Every structure is written in structure tokens, then in C-alpha cells.
Amino acid sequence: MRFVRGFVLCMTLLVGLGSSCLHAQTTGEQVEDPAALFNEWLTVMTEFTADVRFTEADVKAFLEHWQEANELVNEEHEEEFPDIESILADEAYRSWAKSRGLNPETWMRASMRILLMMSREQMTQHSVAAEEQLAQQQEELEAQRSELGEEMYEQMKQALAMSASMMKSARQAYDKLPEPTKQEQALLDRYRAELQRVMQDEDAEEEW
């Protein structure tokens, strides 16, 4: 599912949606606030996984099946933030899960919990660097102001400001996520390289 990538790619999504919002502002179109959509999705996912605590068996099942499930669901649900209940009700997904010996809802809840915890870690690791990079882009924009012309300068300045706002909003949203339990953190530490590889392999196959 597109919406369960790591923090860096979630940021790419928000920046991309921010560009769409900027275009809409210049054309008079009405669009929903992408940061609000992202925050709403995180709230839904937090509630969806609230009663879940993943085990080593869950981590192994995630590593074995996630990419296949992700490809299957993306064929049926093209939204950036698909409704989790519609995915659970999808007969194609349910049939796939049962054919792999998985409980469709239990496996999805545990997998989403794992992904949220991994994304939370990535936020902590990468948010400062991402904000520093954005600040550098803002400095470069100011240096190129005379070359760009005022209209282009203002549009790019507004896009960067929107990106900065979305980064801040996403960071605040991730800060509200529950922390992993002691046992879960130990599993994340043990399987981090494999989990990151699964997430990176998924990212590499997707185009923004």
C-alpha cells in the first residue's frame, strides 16, 4: 500500500501533494489539505492497531508476505490513503490471506503496527536532515531570485513554505504515535536490517 512507506517517502508524498495544492491555488481548484489527510490516516491507523502487540512470528510473517500483499492491494486500491476497512472487506485480499494461512484482519493489524513503529523510527532519524535540506533549498531560492523572476520566485517560495509546514505537521503526527513495547523494540532491533530492506524494495518498485 502506497501509504505505508517510511518517513522519507511519506514526506515525498506530502511535498508532491503540496505541489498539487499550489497548482490548485493558481487555477482556482478546490483540494483537501494533504497534511490533514495524512494526519487523519495516522489517527485511523493508530486506532486500528491500538490493541495489537506484535510478536516474532508476526515480524517473520510480515517479512515473508508484505510485498506480495502490497502488490495485490495496490491493484485494487489506487488512493494514496486507502480505507483500511475496504481493504479488509476486499475478497481478493481475504482470499489471498487465507491461501497463505493468515487471518486477514489479524495479519493486517500486526503488519500495520510494525510499519508504524518503523516509520516512527525513521522520522526520528531523518526529520532533522530533511528540514536542513529544505532550509538549504530556501537559501538557494533566495540566491536565484533575480534570475527566476518575481512570479516564479513567489510560486517556488510558496511551495517550499508549504513543504516545510507539511514536514512539521507530519513530525507532530508521528510524535503522537505510541511507542513500541520493550519486547517490540527488541524485535525491531533484531530484524531492523531485514525490515528496512523490505520497505526499501517496495519503495524502489514505486514511482512518484
Image (cartoon, rainbow, N blue to C red):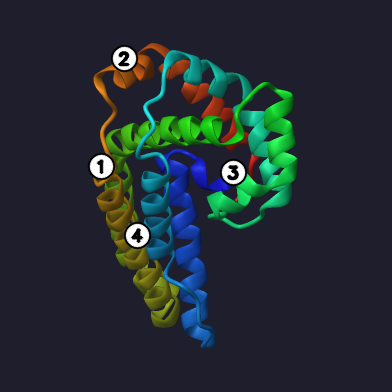
Q: Nearer the viewer, mark 4 or mark 3?
A: 3
Tag of residue 166: 4
For label 2, the SS is helix
Q: Amino acid at mark 3?
A: Met
Q: Which residue is mark 3?
A: 1
Q: Amino acid at mark 1?
A: Val
Q: Earlier in the sequence, mark 2 or mark 3?
A: 3
Q: Residues within 10 Å of mark 1 (few under 14, many from 20)?
A: few
Q: What is the CA distance from the residue labelled 4 to the residue labelled 1?
A: 14 Å
Q: Earlier in the sequence, mark 4 or mark 1?
A: 1
Q: Compared to 44, does 199 lie above or below?
A: above
Q: Which residue is mark 2?
A: 186
Q: Earlier in the sequence, mark 4 or mark 3?
A: 3
Q: Which residue is mark 1?
A: 128
Task: Name, please, the residue furthest toward the bottom.
Answer: 28
Q: Nearer the viewer, residue 26 or 64?
A: 64
For label 3, the SS is loop
Q: Nearer the viewer, mark 1 or mark 2?
A: 2
Q: Earlier in the sequence, mark 1 or mark 2?
A: 1
